[in-house]
Image (cartoon, rainbow, N blue to C red):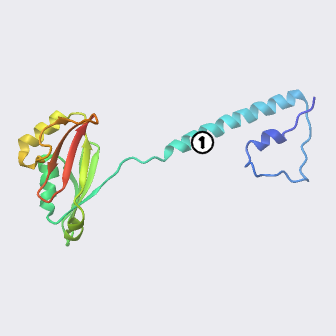
Amino acid sequence: MKYSLQPKIGTFLPSSFLFPDHISFTPFDATTAAGINANFDALERQKNVFIQKTATIMSLIKVIPKIFYSDISVGLKLFTEVLGFKVLYSENEGSEPFYIIARDAVTLYLIGSDEFAQRDRPEIRLETDDIEGIYAEVRQRDPSLLHPNLPEIRLQPWGLKEFAMRDESGVCVIIHQH
């Protein structure tokens, strides 16, 4: 029995590729075919590993929201003084102060902009693995920031334990745990 390379080579080429008429594939014996098949199988495995690695290289890692304040000190109080975020970067010069703040795996941008603060009062959810600990921190640091609609930890019908905070500008932060 004689074998041809054309079917094996075809697995490495786009399906739309047509072999030109002037290319011929010389048939060969079973021993040669076995060696060639082993090489093509190794190449196929390498191709699959490459595809798997490159498919997992690019991924979205996190969302970093911008929160706008007419008075940036209101946001700094809520997030740094009460929730324990640390300032990673600050730019106080100019008309729009800018802060990058973080705690654990959460990063936020606080921006002083009266124009955007007037248009947008966000509600932000922060997930924790220790809602009682976060709640105790908030109650100790500034219980006046607890939202009147959800000032205590409550088990919600959708299965989350939650409490909420609202600063004087109207930004609402809901802390939840699964």
At x 29%, y 55%, the residue is: 65
Say above or below: 109 vs 34. Answer: below
Q: Where is residue 103 in the image (x, y as percent from the top left)?
A: 23, 45
Q: Name the residue under label 1.
A: 51
At x 84%, y 39%, the residue is: 5
- 7 relative position to 111: left or right: right
Q: Position of residue 12 (x, y in %)?
A: 73, 44
- 1 relative position to 95: left or right: right
Q: Name the one closer to the observer, 80 or 119.
A: 119
Residue 120 location, quadrant: bottom left
Q: Position of residue 45 (x, y in %)?
A: 66, 34
**Structural crowding at the residue carrying mark 1, measured as other residues with C-alpha within 10 Å and reported as few (<14), some (14–19) or many (≥20):** few
Secondary-structure class at tag 1 = helix
Which amino acid, by three-letter code, is at mark 1? Answer: Ile
Residue 113 location, quadrant: bottom left
The total number of labels drawn is 1
Q: Which residue lies furthest to the front in this view?
A: 157
At x 89%, y 50%, the residue is: 23
